[in-house]
Image: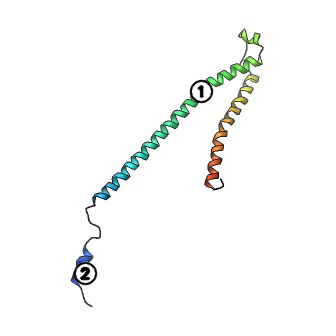
């Protein structure tokens, strides 16, 4: 067997140089800025969702109070209601209020369900 000394030097040399070219550093900078941008977008979206949910939640208590007042006024006669001697916490008033709140919650779910069904259709390529 013949040994070639010039081949040994080539075999011991590293395939990749230890110093990286400038375009690799530029590519890493692009990845870093892309990661920062996506992280920023994620936190911005999270803050927006939080603010929207806070706005929706802030209107629940006044809406319940207004609905209770309207049901109570309709349940009792106007003259009896005007005297202030009515019990708006009575069972018939609270039963109707609970039913209206349930219906309201159901209607709030319909747009989300429609959005889900449209996305499902797009994913399965039926649309």
Helix, strand or loop at disc 1?
loop
The answer to whether residue 4 is above or below residue 35 is below
Q: Position of residue 32 (x, y in %)?
A: 36, 50
Helix, strand or loop at disc 2?
helix
Viewer can see residue 89? no
The answer to whether residue 119 is above or below residue 70 is below
Q: Nearer the viewer, residue 11 or 124?
A: 124
Q: Residue at x 27, y 70 (%)?
A: 14
Q: Residue at x 28, y 57 (%)?
A: 22
Name which of mark 2 and mark 1 comes first in the sequence: 2
Viewer can see residue 120? yes
Colour pattern of the rendering: rainbow
Q: Position of residue 38 (x, y in %)?
A: 43, 47
Q: Nearer the viewer, residue 7 or 95?
A: 7
Cα separation, mark 2 vs mark 1, equals 80 Å
- Seen in the image, is 59 located left or right of residue 87? left
Q: Position of residue 3 (x, y in %)?
A: 24, 87
Q: Residue furthest bottom?
A: 1
Q: Quadrant of residue 103?
A: top right
Q: Nearer the viewer, residue 48 or 71?
A: 48
Q: Which residue is mark 2?
A: 7
Q: Position of residue 72 (x, y in %)?
A: 73, 19
Q: Which residue is mark 1?
A: 59
Q: Residue at x 77, y 19 (%)?
A: 75
């Amino acid at each position: 067997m013949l040994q070639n000394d010039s081949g040994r030097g080539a075999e011991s040399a590293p395939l990749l140089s230890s110093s990286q070219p400038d375009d690799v550093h530029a590519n890493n900078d692009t990845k870093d800025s892309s990661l920062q941008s996506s992280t920023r977008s994620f936190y911005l979206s999270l803050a927006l969702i939080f603010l929207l949910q806070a706005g929706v939640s802030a209107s629940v208590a006044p809406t319940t109070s207004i609905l209770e007042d309207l049901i109570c006024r309709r349940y009792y006669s106007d003259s009896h209601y005007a005297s202030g001697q009515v019990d708006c916490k009575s069972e018939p008033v609270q039963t109707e209020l609970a039913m209206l709140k349930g219906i309201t919650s159901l209607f709030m779910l319909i747009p989300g369900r429609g959005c889900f069904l449209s996305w499902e259709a797009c994913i399965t390529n039926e649309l």
